[in-house]
C-alpha cells in the first residue's frame, strides 16, 4: 500500500516546504501481529531523502516507544533513533548516532510516523 500526503493534508508539514511525502508499509507473516516498519521518501529544502523507519523492539520483545531510522540523501546516510517527548520529536543520544539533522527533517519524520500509526 502506498499513500501520498500533500501539504493540504498536514498544515505543519506544508509550512516546512516539502513537495509530497508517501509511505509504504513493510509487512511480515500473516499469522502474527506486525510491529511498525515502513519506508518513505520526501524532498525538503531541495534535498531528496529516502528513509526506512522501524518501531524499536527490545531484545525481550517489548515495544520501546522509539523508532530506528536509516535516512539517506545526496549528502550522506544517517542512522538515528527518533524519540517522542510530548508532541515533539527529537533524535536520540546513543553512541551510534551519526551526524546531526535539522529539526525540520526530524519533525517531518515524526509527522509521518504519527500519520502511519493512526
Image (cartoon, rainbow, N blue to C red):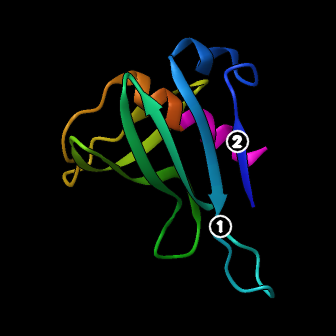
Residue 115 horizontal/vertical position (percent): 71, 39
Residue 36 falls in image quadrant: bottom right
User: Tag 1: Cα neighbours inside 10 Å, few (<14), some, or many (≥20)?
Assistant: some
Q: Name the quarter where the C terminus is drawn.
A: top right
Q: Label 1, secondary structure: give it.
A: loop
Q: Is residue 79 above or below residue 12?
A: below
User: Tag 2: Cα neighbours inside 10 Å, few (<14), some, or many (≥20)?
Assistant: few
Label 1: which residue? 35
Residue 2 falls in image quadrant: bottom right
Residue 1 falls in image quadrant: bottom right
Q: Which residues are magenta?
A: 110-118
Residue 77 horizontal/vertical position (percent): 25, 51
Task: Name the front one of labels 1 and 2.
Answer: 2
Q: Is residue 14 above or below residue 118?
A: above
Task: Judge by depth and name the residue closer to the eye, 69 or 46.
Answer: 46
Q: Is residue 83 above or below residue 6?
A: below
Residue at image position (49%, 27%) is 107
Taking the image as shown, residue 112 lies to the left or right of residue 57, namely: right
Q: How many marks?
A: 2
Q: Earlier in the sequence, mark 1 or mark 2?
A: 2
Residue at image position (49%, 51%) is 67
Marks 1 and 2, how far apart in space?
Answer: 21 Å
Q: Label 2, secondary structure: give it.
A: strand
Taking the image as shown, residue 78 lies to the left or right of residue 66, namely: left
Label 2: which residue? 4
Residue 15 horizontal/vertical position (percent): 57, 11
Residue at image position (44%, 51%) is 51
Q: Is residue 101 magenta?
A: no
Amino acid at each position: 500500500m502506498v499513500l501520498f500526503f500533500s501539504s493540504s493534508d498536514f498544515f505543519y508539514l506544508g509550512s516546512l516546504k516539502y513537495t509530497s511525502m508517501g509511505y509504504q508499509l513493510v509487512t511480515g507473516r500473516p499469522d502474527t501481529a506486525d510491529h511498525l516498519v515502513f519506508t518513505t521518501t520526501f524532498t525538503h529544502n531541495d534535498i531528496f531523502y529516502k528513509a526506512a523507519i522501524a518501531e524499536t523492539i527490545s531484545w525481550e520483545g517489548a515495544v520501546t516507544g522509539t523508532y530506528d531510522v536509516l535516512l539517506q540523501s545526496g549528502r550522506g546516510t544517517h542512522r538515528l533513533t527518533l524519540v517522542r517527548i510530548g508532541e515533539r520529536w527529537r533524535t536520540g543520544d546513543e553512541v551510534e548516532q551519526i551526524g546531526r539533522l535539522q529539526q525540520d527533517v526530524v519533525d517531518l519524520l515524526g509527522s509521518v510516523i504519527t500519520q502511519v500509526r493512526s
